[in-house]
């Protein structure tokens, strides 16, 4: 299991505000730094096992530029490294969309020149409609997905599993065989969506209603699990779980009876992105790297090896149809993904959200 990628989504989004606030505090923007020409070494921050092993070699063959890759364990780790280093230390950072949104708002990443990234044409049109960065003005999307219900279609009897309510108030044959995610932003999501509230709400009354409903559901759960939920489905210990689409695929790879569904009430949308931190002295070459990342074979590697959907249409079109048949959620269209609610940087409201999630865990 790729722990680095999980932390990109879990630890990162849950505490985005605190990390972004730290990165944005103090100091004046010094503007664009003096740029270096010729072959350079780009310093890249990314999650472990999230890029092809031969990426650096292939990038150097194509551009003459080399890569120095630093692996991070979470979005907070990446933000801390950027903030703790001299400006210009890092040229590229992989970050999840709420972090990207916060850094854009704080003017801490470079604006992109789309004319220098012709492979933007490989993206789905919907990839230019992402609320955290409309038009990809400051970032490019790398992978995307959603959260829903993973379930064993052979073990639920006649129960139709298609609603967050199936986890919150399960039928008798599901009771004690359901798990939910215990990470802040996802722990409250089933209740928030069931109540018709935003997954990004910081309203005290709405959060309390979600807490009450989530606490009521605890008595029918097998437990909270953000690490091994798909393994519990494989073993049959659980029959329906809240989980991320890509992680559901890890279970499906072991048992084809494991299916994924976006609940009828809707869900969230997360996006992993690339940005150029302010202070880079290699902006031209960083654009070259972004363009290289958007080549179809690189997006195809992500889909085939991590089992995440990618916003790169050319890459998705190149996939073996058998892969999409084996993992049907890989074929969820971009239009459906964008119908889900994008996770946002909660600003000062993050503490209220975290407090609400803590009440559920303690309740």
Image: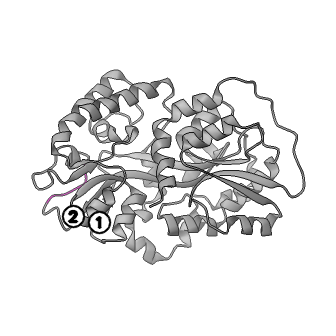
Image depth: mark 1 or mark 2 in front: 2
Image quadrant holding the N terminus, namely bottom left
Q: Which residue is mark 2?
A: 236
Q: Which residue is mark 1?
A: 258
Asked whether the beta carbons under mark 1 and mark 2 sit within 8 Å of each other, the answer is: no
Q: Secondary structure at mark 1?
A: strand
**Residue at the extreme left:** 172
Report the side of 2 relative to 288 (left or right): left
Sequence-wise, which precedes: disc 1 or disc 2? Answer: 2
Among the 4 quarters of the image, the one containing residue 316: bottom right
Range covered by the magenta-colored residues: 159-163
Residue drawn at 50 percent across, 42 percent down: 12
Residue 162 belongs to the span the image colors magenta: yes
Q: Is residue 131 visible?
A: no
Q: Position of residue 274 (x, y in %)?
A: 64, 49
Residue drawn at 55 percent across, 43 percent down: 75
Q: Secondary structure at mark 2?
A: loop
Q: Position of residue 186 (x, y in %)?
A: 37, 42
**Vertical position of residue 228 compared to residue 184: above or below:** below
């Amino acid at each position: 299991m790729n722990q680095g990628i999980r932390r990109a989504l879990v630890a990162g989004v849950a505490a985005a505000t605190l990390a972004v606030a730290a990165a944005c505090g103090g100091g004046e923007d010094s503007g664009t730094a003096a740029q270096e020409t010729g072959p350079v070494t780009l310093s890249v921050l990314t999650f472990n096992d999230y890029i092809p092993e031969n990426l650096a070699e292939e990038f150097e063959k194509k551009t003459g530029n080399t890569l120095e890759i630093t692996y991070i364990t979470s979005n907070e780790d990446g933000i801390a490294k950027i903030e703790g280093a001299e400006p210009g230390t890092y040229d590229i950072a992989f970050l999840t969309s709420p972090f990207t949104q916060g850094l854009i708002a704080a003017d801490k990443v470079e604006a992109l020149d789309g004319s220098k990234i012709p492979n933007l044409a490989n993206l789905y049109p919907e990839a230019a409609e992402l609320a955290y960065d409309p038009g990809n003005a400051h970032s490019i999307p790398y992978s995307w997905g959603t959260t829903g219900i993973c379930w064993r279609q052979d073990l639920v009897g006649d129960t139709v599993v298609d609603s967050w309510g199936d986890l919150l108030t399960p039928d008798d044959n599901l009771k004690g065989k359901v798990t939910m995610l215990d990470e802040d932003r996802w722990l409250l999501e089933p209740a928030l969506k069931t109540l018709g509230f935003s997954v990004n709400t910081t309203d005290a009354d709405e959060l309390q209603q979600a807490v009450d409903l989530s606490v009521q559901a605890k008595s029918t759960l097998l437990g909270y699990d953000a690490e091994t939920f798909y393994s519990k489905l494989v073993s049959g210990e659980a029959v329906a779980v809240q989980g991320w689409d890509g992680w559901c695929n890890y279970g499906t790879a072991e048992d084809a009876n494991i299916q994924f569904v976006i609940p009828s009430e809707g869900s969230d949308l997360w996006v992993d992105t690339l940005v150029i931190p302010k202070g880079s002295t290699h902006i031209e070459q960083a654009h070259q790297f972004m363009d290289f990342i958007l080549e179809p074979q690189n997006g195809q590697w992500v889909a085939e090896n991590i089992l995440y959907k990618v916003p790169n249409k050319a890459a998705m079109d190149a996939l073996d149809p058998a892969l999409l048949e084996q993992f049907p959620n890989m074929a969820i269209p971009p239009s459906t993904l964008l119908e889900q609610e994008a996770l946002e940087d909660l600003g000062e409201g993050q503490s209220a959200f975290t407090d609400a999630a803590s009440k559920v865990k303690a309740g």
